[in-house]
Image (cartoon, helix red, strand yellow):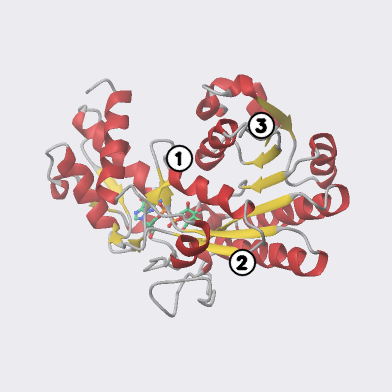
Amino acid sequence: MASKMTTKCALITGITGQDGSYLAEWLLGKGYRVHGIVRRVALEDPDHRLSRLKEIRGRLVLHAASLESYASIHRVVHEVQPDECYHLAAQSFVSYSFDDEFSTLNTNINGTHFLLSALKTLVPQCRFYFAGSSEMFGMAETVPQNEDTRFHPRSSYGISKVAGFDLTRNYREAYGMFACNGILFNHESPRRGFEFVSRKITAGVARILAGKSTELRLGNLEALRDWGHAREYVAAMWLMLQQAQPDDYVIATGQCHSVREFVELAFSHVGLDYTKFVTRDPELYRPAEVNLLQGDAGKARRLLGWTHRVELAGLIREMVDNDCRALGII
Ligand code: G4F
């Protein structure tokens, strides 16, 4: 009997992050041999930097390389000869991209370019996924945003993602590569980094409940986002690479909530009134804000059969409970 498990080999950049760790688990579950590109410092400090991979570390092959070095990317692609490549690595914190536009643009654009170029040279049949972002829509002209909505990025991060999107589409059109763009709206989980607003809020709630803190400083509470669960979004990445034709897809819940609503839900989950703890800090406002993101994932639903299941309230409960457990208060 033929097994349903694949013998394919996948290469993931950004494997140590939230999405990379979920994707690695997903692919291992499907029988893939999973390789990841990590920074050398990650291998030297595994307890801290590979923490999201601790359960699966022994089943992965990790390669030290830098997205800033074409030679190192070329070496890894040559060694691995992947069937599928998921390019998730980036400087992905929008706020930071205002502090250092140059390194955000250099790392994000060159990293994508180096990888595409190495794949084209060494394994042109490899299927490629690029982690595009709803930040590409920025000051969007229409609501909700879909694959036809014009891009108007509002940060160097957003600009770098538009460039990556265009590079990916160009390698598809010019060289016939199977290259797809996922335009993912915000996606969170207990594995989210603490610098993003969702985790900052849920970790802040836990610290206040534990008596370790008395306030939570936040920026713009009126920004509207379409938040989904990261575990569900990595399945969409994989589905894109299993289709007959390469294409670009929006992945979103279609529902939009303000940062204030997120805060209110997180505090009320543990019986607290957020107005007693949240302080507005003008320093945390961005020089150019993206006010409203709401995705239309109709194309992904029709062609990939993908849909979200976890709603915002459930996502927040999971994140708050996880942060409370980490502090030993539930
Ligand atoms: O959580 P955020 O930092 O995420 P942002 O900027 O929407 O970007 C995230 O999602 C994108 C997909 O759309 C990814 F491409 C990107 O890599 C990243 O994962 O901020 C969300 C909103 C913003 O409007 C921000 O101004 O929350 C607002 N906010 C208010 N106070 C804050 C804070 N954001 C952060 N990080 N910290 C605050 O204190």
Tell me the quadrant of the picture where the N terminus can be found: top right
Q: Is residue 42 left or right of residue 195?
A: right
Q: Earlier in the sequence, mark 2 or mark 3?
A: 3
Q: Residues within 10 Å of mark 2 (few under 14, many from 20)?
A: many
Q: Nearer the viewer, residue 237 or 135?
A: 237
List the residue tagged with mark 1: 193
In three-dimensional space, the C-alpha distance between marks 2 and 1, rounded to whole angstroms, equals 23 Å
| Residue designated by label 2 | 162
Q: Amino acid at mark 2?
A: Val
- The residue that disc 3 covers is 2
Q: In the shown orientation, is residue 79 left or right of residue 85?
A: right
Residue drawn at (37%, 54%), measured in percent from left and top? 227
Mark 3 falls on what kind of element?
Answer: loop
The reply to whether residue 172 is visible in this rendering is yes
The kind of secondary structure element at disc 2 is helix
Q: Where's residue 150, x and y in %? A: 53, 77
Q: Amino acid at mark 3?
A: Ala
- The vertical placement of 54 against 206, above or below, is above
- Answer with left or right where residue 51 lies relative to residue 104: left
Q: Which circle, 2 or 3, is nearer the viewer?
A: 3
Q: Amino acid at mark 1?
A: Gly
